[in-house]
Image (cartoon, grey):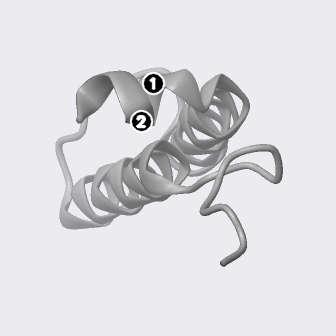
Amino acid sequence: MLSRMFGNWWTTLLGFVAGVVQYLATAGATPPTTRAEWTSLLLSAILFALGLAAKDARTGSAPK
């Protein structure tokens, strides 16, 4: 199952980059200490999870 998720490297990479950029833009390059920074970290993790679980256009179910 994980090989399928990481096989969609484009969406995985996009989710990772989006998560990192979102965290750096809101909290900077420091570990989270405030509630707002922890919220930013959680949202960044959600962006990464969406990118990990998403399929790109070249993968998917074959038409029946």
Quadrant assignment, res 16: top right
Residue that protrudes farthest toward the front in the picture = 64
> Horizontal placement of 48 versus 9: left or right?
left
- Residue 8 at x, y percent in the picture: 60, 32
Callout 1 touching callout 2 (CB < 8 Å): yes
Residue 46 lies, in percent from the top left, at 37, 60
Q: Nearer the viewer, residue 60 or 24?
A: 60
Which numbered tag is attached to residue 6? 1
Q: Amino acid at mark 1?
A: Phe
For residue 56, above or below residue 46: above
Can I make out residue 10 in this image?
Answer: yes
State the count of labels: 2
Q: Left or right: where does residue 56 sit relative to residue 5?
A: right
Q: Position of residue 23 (x, y in %)?
A: 51, 43
Q: Between 31 and 45, which is closer to the camera in this rendering?
A: 45
For this orientation, the residue located farthest to the right is 57
Residue nearest the viewer, comparing 11 with 29: 11
Displayed quadrant of residue 61: bottom right
> Element type at marker 2?
helix
- Position of 21 compared to 6: left or right? right
Question: Helix, strand, or loop for circle 1?
Answer: helix
Q: Which residue is mark 2?
A: 5
What separation in Å lies between label 1 and label 2 (alpha carbons)? 4 Å
**Tag 2: Cα neighbours inside 10 Å, few (<14), some, or many (≥20)?**
some
* Quadrant that contains the N terminus: top left
Can the viewer see residue 31 in this picture? no
> Mark 2 belongs to which amino acid?
Met
Residue at point 80%, 44% (across, down):
58
